[in-house]
């Protein structure tokens, strides 16, 4: 992609009302646009990152048997009444609206109710199970405070997956598979060494649900971390009997700030019972289908990555979710830079080419702000020997290598 053609521009200052570092940097670098508190538009560079994250999640969900769908944002009041989750006293983040033809609708903040109702059309026998479905969906939540940039949106992208199984054992097997898949997602996104399986309240079979918490001061949660065991405990379940069950002592725990990037939860048969989703077993006996619900905050993950890796010059993307691998920077060597750009593009390598007629200092500052993993500088200095300078944005390490070697690497 040619930077000249990118309609977005970098800017020196973030909007005054934006207090979160992730959003400040993403706005300044042209990845997102702030519509209002908690609502951000994703611009070309931002969308590329979202799509990279989604692709990692998609691959890992498909590997454990997930099938991708996309459900509507508009949701029926009756369904949520059946499970007693329509009332604003019960769920405090609802956005609701009225239909002109009469009646109310809700904007999806989660999808357990409509998807479980939908499964009534497809599941009636043990032969129809298990079913694992997921979607990437824009959720709407009327969050009271939206001060964490894209880490807490009133409109945000979530991956939500739902499992339908016949038994507690089958459910647990998939639930554990999901834990592994989630850790692989966070590892691939560059957050592996600071993301911890965290015991939280709720959950049908084990008294716990599980969160995936990533250590960062920008997070809104406080968790109790056991580094040795690589697990953490949420404050709400920090009880003597829980510590005993997990085999940890209170003194071994560190109180740390973290962001909840994912959450997995067992509903058991309760929701299916409420919504009439039953299956007949081999003997023809009817049972409620066991439901599990598994979320990843796609945009929260993106914001968390920005918070963690950014330095005083700007964003630093891990290669796996960067919008491009290379930022090719031409400093008065247009012909050579053009040739390199074409060679990379021919090989399908993702490169942003700074072909603008701007000062070197501005190009460097913009490249540092945008945060593409490798800056490739083509300048008069390398003209005679036909070399380029490759700078690693994360480590700051630079290498001079021959153009030929670079293009063929
Ligand atoms: P939180 O406790 O942070 O409000 P939650 O427990 O309500 O989150 P879930 O309903 O479990 O969240 O949603 C699944 C995932 O979606 C969360 O783990 C988180 O990563 C993400 N998420 C939740 N709310 C938001 C939000 N307002 N903005 C961005 N991501 C969110
Ligand atoms: Mg949660």
Image (cartoon, rainbow, N blue to C red):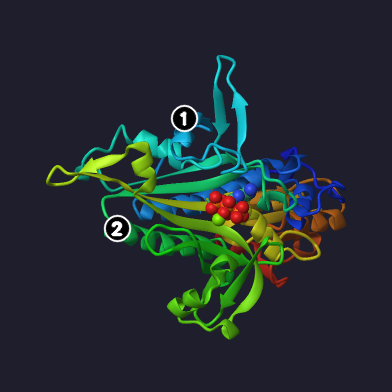
**If the image is split into quadrants, where does the N terminus sit?**
top right
Residue drawn at 68 percent across, 60 percent down: 220
**Residue with the mark numbered 2:** 168
Between marks 1 and 2 in the image, the one whose residue lies nearer the viewer: 1
Q: Give the image quarter of residue 400.
A: bottom right
Disc ID at residue 144: none
Q: Secondary structure at mark 2?
A: helix
Residue drawn at 37 percent across, 34 percent down: 118
Q: Residues within 10 Å of mark 2 (few under 14, many from 20)?
A: some
Disc ID at residue 78: 1
Q: Is residue 342 visible?
A: no
Ligand 2 appears in which quadrant?
Answer: bottom right
- Toward the viewer: 197 or 46? 197
Q: Secondary structure at mark 1?
A: helix
- Toward the viewer: 152 or 209? 209
In the rendered image, residue 192, in percent from the top left (x then y), is placed at 54, 68
Seen in the picture, residue 140 relative to 11 is either above or below; the reply is above
**If the image is split into quadrants, where does the C terminus sit?**
bottom right
In the rendered image, residue 121, in percent from the top left (x then y), is placed at 31, 32
Q: Give the image quarter of residue 307.
A: bottom right
- Does ligand 1 reach within 8 Å of label 1's beta carbon? no
Which numbered disc flags the more N-terminal residue, 1 or 2? 1
In the rendered image, residue 159, in percent from the top left (x then y), is placed at 50, 48
In the rendered image, residue 25, in percent from the top left (x then y), is placed at 77, 54
- Does ligand 1 reach within 8 Å of label 2's beta carbon? no
Q: Residues within 10 Å of mark 1 (few under 14, many from 20)?
A: few
Horizontal side of residue 171 vs 235, given as left or right: left
Horizontal side of residue 291 vs 297, given as left or right: left
Residue drawn at 44 percent across, 48 percent down: 161
Seen in the picture, residue 74 relative to 55 is either above or below; the reply is above
How many marks the image carries: the answer is: 2
- Toward the viewer: 409 or 30? 30
């Amino acid at each position: 992609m040619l930077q000249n053609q990118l309609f977005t521009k970098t800017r020196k200052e973030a909007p005054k009302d934006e207090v979160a570092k992730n959003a400040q940097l993403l706005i300044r670098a042209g990845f997102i646009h702030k519509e209002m508190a908690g609502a951000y538009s994703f611009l070309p560079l931002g969308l590329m990152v979202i799509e990279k994250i989604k692709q990692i999640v998609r691959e890992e969900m498909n590997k454990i048997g997930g099938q991708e769908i996309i459900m509507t944002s508009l949701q029926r009041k009756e369904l949520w009444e059946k499970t007693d989750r329509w009332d604003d006293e019960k769920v405090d983040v609802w956005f609701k609206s009225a239909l002109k033809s009469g009646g109310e609708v809700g904007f999806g903040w989660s999808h357990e109710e409509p998807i479980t109702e939908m499964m009534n059309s497809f599941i009636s026998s043990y032969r129809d199970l298990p079913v694992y479905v997921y979607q990437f969906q824009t959720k709407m939540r009327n969050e009271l405070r939206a001060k964490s940039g894209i880490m807490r949106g009133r409109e945000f992208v979530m991956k939500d997956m739902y499992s339908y199984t016949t038994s507690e054992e089958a459910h647990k097997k998939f639930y554990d598979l999901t834990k592994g898949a989630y850790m692989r997602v966070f590892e691939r996104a560059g957050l592996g060494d600071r993301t911890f399986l965290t015991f939280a309240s709720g959950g049908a079979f084990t008294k716990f649900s599980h969160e995936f918490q990533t250590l960062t001061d920008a997070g809104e949660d406080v968790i109790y971390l056991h580094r040795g065991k690589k697990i953490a405990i949420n404050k709400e379940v920090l009880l003597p009997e829980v510590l005993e069950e997990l085999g940890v002592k209170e003194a071994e725990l560190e109180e740390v700030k973290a962001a909840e990037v994912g959450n997995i939860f067992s509903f058991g048969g309760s929701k299916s019972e409420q919504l009439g989703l039953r299956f007949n077993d081999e003997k023809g006996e009817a049972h409620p289908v066991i439901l599990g619900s598994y979320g990843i905050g796609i945009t929260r993950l993106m914001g968390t990555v920005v918070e963690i890796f950014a330095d005083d010059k700007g964003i630093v993307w891990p290669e796996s979710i960067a919008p491009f691998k290379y930022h090719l920077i031409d400093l008065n060597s247009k012909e050579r830079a053009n040739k390199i750009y074409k060679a990379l593009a021919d090989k399908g390598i993702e490169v942003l080419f700074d072909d603008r007629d701007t000062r070197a200092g501005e190009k460097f500052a913009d490249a540092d702000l945008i945060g593409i993993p490798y800056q490739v500088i083509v300048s008069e200095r390398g003209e005679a020997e036909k070399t380029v300078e490759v700078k690693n944005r994360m480590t700051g390490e630079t290498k001079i290598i021959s153009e030929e070697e670079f293009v063929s690497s």
